[in-house]
Amino acid sequence: MLHSHGYKPSLVCLIMKLLYGTPYVITCHLWYLHTFRLKMYTALEKISMRFAARVIGVSREIASDLERAGIPERKLEVIENGIDVDRYSEFELEPKDAEKMRKDLGLDRDSFIIGSLGRLTEQKDYQTLIKAAGEALKENVALEFIVAGEGELKSALIKECRDLGIENRFHFLGFRNDKEKLLKLMSVFVLTSLDEGLPMAMLEAMAARLPVVTTPVGGIPKVINPGENGLFVEPGNVEEIKKNLLVLAGNSTMREKLGRSGLETVKKGYSIEEMVRKYLAVYSQQSVGLN
């Protein structure tokens, strides 16, 4: 059988089904509809989903969206994303390595680093984070911001930082394959998304014992209990984001508490082992078409 995690693979699965009768499963993380091309891909994937043995949403909200899109309820499952918790919780960045990394990235030696990981798209709303960073830096000049990821908005976001005069305090690092190192370099992880499924980057940050400031969108409210293992901010609310970032920057006890609770949360419910167990159960079901 086949398992798709994207628009184009879903079309390949449909072709294989029509030609050879190969059963397949599709996992939907989130639909991106901000360009005509993506809208077209989404429409084609919806057709493929009707022929799939199972369609899996990574959150209850996505599963509900799939049902509203016409995917039969009998085909739908919810399996939350899972991560390799130990990869992030057990990794330690030695002080000399952290100092070298800061130097290589153009960061101050002793700045307080607030960071994020993700594509540079409208959905992630880094525009709001940049505005909040500009306001926060007026009150705490020791802050420094990093974002790892690529996307079509990179040039525009860099220009926004330049226009605000914070280009030396807000760094776009591009694609990185050393996420565990970057997370250990941060003191706070922030997510300002307008929409999400269940973001892997947030789970990874929690596994790295980072306090998380995030918008309550998609499947995030199922994971975050505000004040216990993270903090919520309303999408687009510059003042609220600024306030929470400044509070965490000045309160190491609160950062440690949220970080410890976040790690326990992902250990209990969002490990890769738990995710694999659920997928294996789907694969083994008679209705998948293996028998």
Image (cartoon, grey):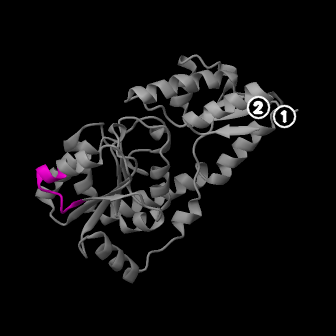
Q: Which residue is mark 2?
A: 23
Q: Which mark is residue 290?
A: 1
Disc 2 residue type? Pro
The x and y percentages for residue 33 are 41, 28
Q: Nearer the viewer, mark 1 or mark 2?
A: 2
156 or 165, which is in the foreground? 156
> Is 45 within the magenta?
no
Relative placement, left or right, of 17 versus 252 is right
Vertical placement of residue 219 versus 247, above or below: above
Lower position in the chain sequence, tag 1 or tag 2: 2
Question: Whole-percent x and y of residue 152?
Answer: 33, 43
In the rendered image, which quarter is residue 5 located in?
top right
Q: Position of residue 29 (x, y in %)?
A: 53, 37
Q: Determine whether label 1 and label 2 are within 8 Å by CB.
A: yes
Tell me the element at label 1. Answer: loop
Question: Is disc 1 surrounded by few (<14), some (14 to 19) or many (20+) residues within 10 Å?
Answer: few
Q: Position of residue 156 (x, y in %)?
A: 23, 45
Task: Give the residue drawn at x 15%, y 64%.
Answer: 141
Mark yes or no: residue 81 visible. yes
Give the number of callouts.
2
In depth, the one of 238 and 105 nearer the eye is 105
Q: CA distance from mark 1 to mark 2?
A: 8 Å
In the image, residue 61 above or below residue 283 = above
Query: What range of the chain is rendered magenta?
Result: 161-170
Of residue 52 and residue 209, the one placed in the foreground of this image is 52
Residue drawn 45% across the image and 40% down it: 220
Residue 241 visible here? no
Name the image quarter holding the N terminus.
Answer: top right
